[in-house]
Image (cartoon, coloured by chain):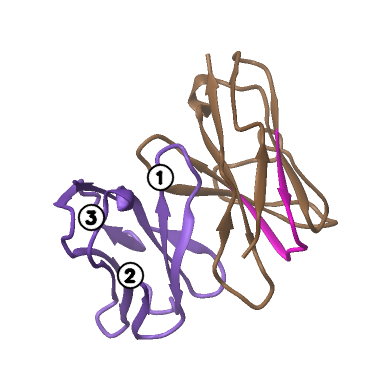
Amino acid sequence: SAVISQKPSRDICQRGTSLTIQCQVDSQVTMMFWYRQQPGQSLTLIATANQGSEATYESGFVIDKFPISRPNLTFSTLTVSNMSPEDSSIYLCSVEFEGYYEQYFGPGTRLTVT
Amino acid sequence: QKEVEQDPGPLSVPEGAIVSLNCTYSNSAFQYFMWYRQYSRKGPELLMYTYSSGNKEDGRFTAQVDKSSKYISLFIRDSQPSDSATYLCAMTGGNQFYFGTGTSLTVIP
């Protein structure tokens, strides 16, 4: 397993601004992912954060809106850009260790856009 | 047809009851199955994972996989109020993860 932290834990932002969410893992991991979970809904994968290369985005998510960085094997950031109220959600990072298939999740960042 | 179907509940049971949570899936390529527990305002916590058909037990929790029927279950014995949470099933064939929509469980003291 892994200990995963996210910052900030929550934020209230104004429309049109951007927020960067950080994800830190206590050990080196192969795969890191970013998910969105809207109230009462399941998890939707935004992108896979690749170390040393551009993130791989899922259908409906684009780099201009959700730029991702992954400078090393223990850290990643997700930026939610030019926010609108529809971006209000919980944003979760998760990790997967090489050779295993289960994912471990961080505590989430609760974002409210007004 | 969704890849993974899960009854959203809500499910309400008295303390001490046996709880059965279920998911069905359509993709026969799925080989790895997981159950997550998510408390309100928290991230999902991995409860159990299994890579094969059959049963896997961990304390009060039993995960069951029936690949022939494309059906997985999580049983909770002697349920406690602290088990009140949303339970998500998840599965993968090695590439993308697919999650159920979650079942909300309340255990009443």
- Could you tell me how far apart the alpha carbons at marks 2 and 1 are, in whole angstroms? 17 Å
- Magenta span of residues: A21-34
The mark found on residue B7 in the picture is: 3
Q: Can the viewer see residue B101 in this picture?
A: no
SS under mark 1: loop
* Rendering quarter of residue A61: top right
Q: Callout 1 environment at 10 Å: few (<14), some (14 to 19), or many (20+)?
A: some
SS under mark 2: strand
The mark found on residue B39 in the picture is: 1
Which residue is drawn at the image coordinates 54% and 43% (left, top)? A60
Q: Which chain is brown?
A: A
A95 falls in the magenta region:
no
Position in image of residue B35 (x %, y %): 40, 64
The mark found on residue B95 in the picture is: none
Chain letter of the residue carrying label 2: B
Q: Can the viewer see residue A81 in this picture?
A: yes
Work out whether disc 3 and disc 1 sit on a shared chain.
yes
Chain letter of the residue carrying label 3: B
Do tag 2 and tag 1 residues touch (Cβ < 8 Å)? no
* Rendering quarter of residue A65: top right
Tag 1: amino acid: Tyr
Tag 3: amino acid: Asp
